[in-house]
Image (spheres, rainbow, N blue to C red):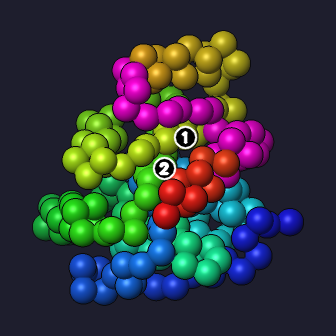
Amino acid sequence: MSLYPDAVFIKSANALSQFVPDTGGEVAFAGRSNAGKSSAINIIVNRRQFARTSKTPGRTQLVNFFSLDGDRRIVDLPGYGFARVADAMREHWGNLIADYFETRKSLKGLILIVDIRRQLTDFDRQMLEFAESVGLPVHVLLTKSDKLKRGQAANALLAVRKELGDRASVQLFSALKRSGEDEARRVLERFLEAA
């Protein structure tokens, strides 16, 4: 059963003026297209197709706001880096994400979704810089950990932890095997409790 039985989609925004009211607390989910962001959200919230998944990378093209309960939200940011879109659209997304980070007082944390097989990309590092610029705690989910052998996954985890130091916490995660879901949920709750 879901810890968030009242969780519901609120709205999608394509501009700062369309964001939901900046009250309560929210945690943003960001990640490269095809890193498994929507699947991770669905597992953490424990609701199938809560955030829509797709075989086509880059389907999340708007800032999507979801209510968990009361005045607590998660925000699904546009996937970056892979989607086949025009440069103007990609620039718009970049500006939209920058606006989001720079203006949201209710933003309490960032959960960064990284495909364990790709490790940190320049786009992921840019998201970390956005978060650091506003003093936001970051937790990294190394998704698709089931795709690697246990030793390879452990080595990848160590490599990312070494690169990040104390800039972010990191864990292994697999939506397919549902491994790491409890730890990810605890981090989400800890971020939201800071509201």
Q: Circle 1 — which element?
A: strand
Asked if disc 2 and disc 1 are in contact, CB closer than 8 Å, the reply is: yes
For image coordinates 77% across by 65% down, the residue present is 3
Instruction: Please tell me whether residue 178 belongs to the stretch shown in magenta.
Output: yes
Q: Which of 97 and 37 is in front in this view?
A: 97
* Circle 1: residue type: Leu
Secondary structure at badge 2 equals strand
Chain part drawn in magenta: 163-185
Image side of residue 105 versus residue 76, left or right:
left
Q: Residue at x 43, y 34 (%)?
A: 168
Q: Residues within 10 Å of mark 1 (few under 14, many from 20)?
A: many
Q: Residues within 10 Å of mark 2 (few under 14, many from 20)?
A: many
**In terms of depth relative to the viewer, which is nearer, 33 or 43?**
43
Residue 123, position as x, y percentages in the image: 28, 43
In this view of the protein, which residue sits in the foreground, 141 or 33? Answer: 141
Residue 83 is one of the magenta-drawn residues: no
Q: Which amino acid does label 2 sit on?
A: Ile
Q: In which quarter of the image is the N terminus?
A: bottom right
- Residue drawn at (24%, 80%), measured in percent from left and top? 15
Name the residue that disc number 1 marks: 141
Percent x, y of residue 167: 37, 32
Where residue 38 sits: x, y (%)? 56, 60
Q: Is residue 193 visible?
A: yes
Q: Position of residue 6 (x, y in %)?
A: 71, 80
Report the side of 162 relative to 176 (left or right).
Answer: left
Q: Can residue 130 be seen in this view?
A: no
Q: Mark 2 points at which residue?
A: 111
Residue at mark 2 to residue at mark 1: CA–CA distance: 7 Å
